[in-house]
């Protein structure tokens, strides 16, 4: 995945803008982020795409960040029929009912405090790790939490972009 000759990256680079925008919306729900990534095509390497994603994520204003977060379901409640959501939240699949109930309570308290879903890169994390993260981050100031959200969104975007440019290889 180091050159544009990589089939998935080459395919992404040559998609019609409308198709590429739709694919990018599945990666990140922020329209501003998607426009920034589209404007950088063609990417010569996956790493260049990732750097562009990081820069676009860092440039999101509060409204754009809220739009990006709105595309993510709460932890423990993946979006029905969405394989990405289920795959990313796999760590909650075997969670006990007690842990699920605790996550629901913690998610609601977090949303009440910060006004948005608890965002974490859940890929590879256990239910307990996600619970511990929401507990730890609930004490953050809104400014601190925006920094965490931006970092986690960047991680999620990279994972999803990797899938986008490696599908079918």
Image: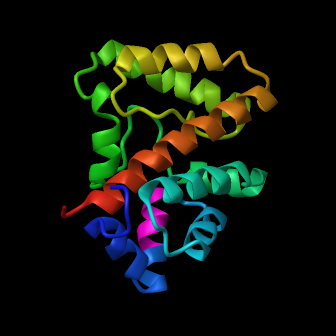
Q: Is 140 situated left or right of 74 in this image?
A: right
Residue at (46, 48) in percent of width and height? 158
Which image quadrant for residue 115? top right
- What segment carries the magenta color? 22-27
Q: Whole-percent x and y of residue 30?
A: 60, 61
The C terminus: image quadrant = bottom left
Residue at (34, 61) in percent of width and height? 165
Query: Could you say which is closer to the camera, residue 27 or residue 109?
Result: 27
Q: Whole-percent x and y of residue 163?
A: 32, 54
Which image quadrant for residue 15? bottom left
Residue at (39, 82) in percent of width and height? 14
The majority secondary structure of the magenta stretch comes to helix
Residue 162 visible in the shown view: yes
Instruction: Give the colouring mode of the picture.
Output: rainbow
Say whether residue 24 is magenta.
yes
56 relative to 132, above or below = below
Q: Is 141 situated left or right of 36 in this image?
A: right
Q: Whole-percent x and y of residue 42?
A: 49, 75
The N terminus: image quadrant = bottom left
Query: Could you say which is closer to the camera, residue 46 or residue 120?
Result: 46
Q: Is 130 situated left or right of 34 in this image?
A: left
Residue at (54, 28) in percent of width and height? 107
């Amino acid at each position: 995945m180091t050159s544009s000759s990589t089939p998935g990256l080459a395919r992404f680079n040559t998609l019609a803008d409308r198709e590429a925008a739709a694919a990018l919306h599945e990666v990140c729900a922020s329209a501003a982020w998607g426009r920034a990534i589209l404007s950088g095509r063609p990417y010569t390497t996956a790493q260049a795409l990732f750097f562009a994603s990081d820069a676009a994520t860092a440039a999101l204003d509060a409204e754009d960040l809220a739009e990006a977060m709105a595309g993510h379901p709460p932890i423990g409640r993946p979006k029905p029929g969405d394989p990405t959501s289920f795959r990313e939240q796999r760590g909650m699949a075997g969670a006990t009912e007690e842990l699920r109930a605790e996550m629901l309570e913690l998610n609601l308290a977090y949303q009440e405090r910060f006004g948005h879903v608890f965002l974490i890169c859940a890929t590879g994390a256990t239910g307990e790790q996600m619970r511990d993260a929401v507990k730890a981050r609930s004490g953050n100031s809104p400014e601190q939490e925006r920094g965490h959200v931006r970092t986690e969104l960047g991680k999620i975007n990279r994972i999803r972009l990797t899938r986008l440019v490696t599908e079918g290889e």
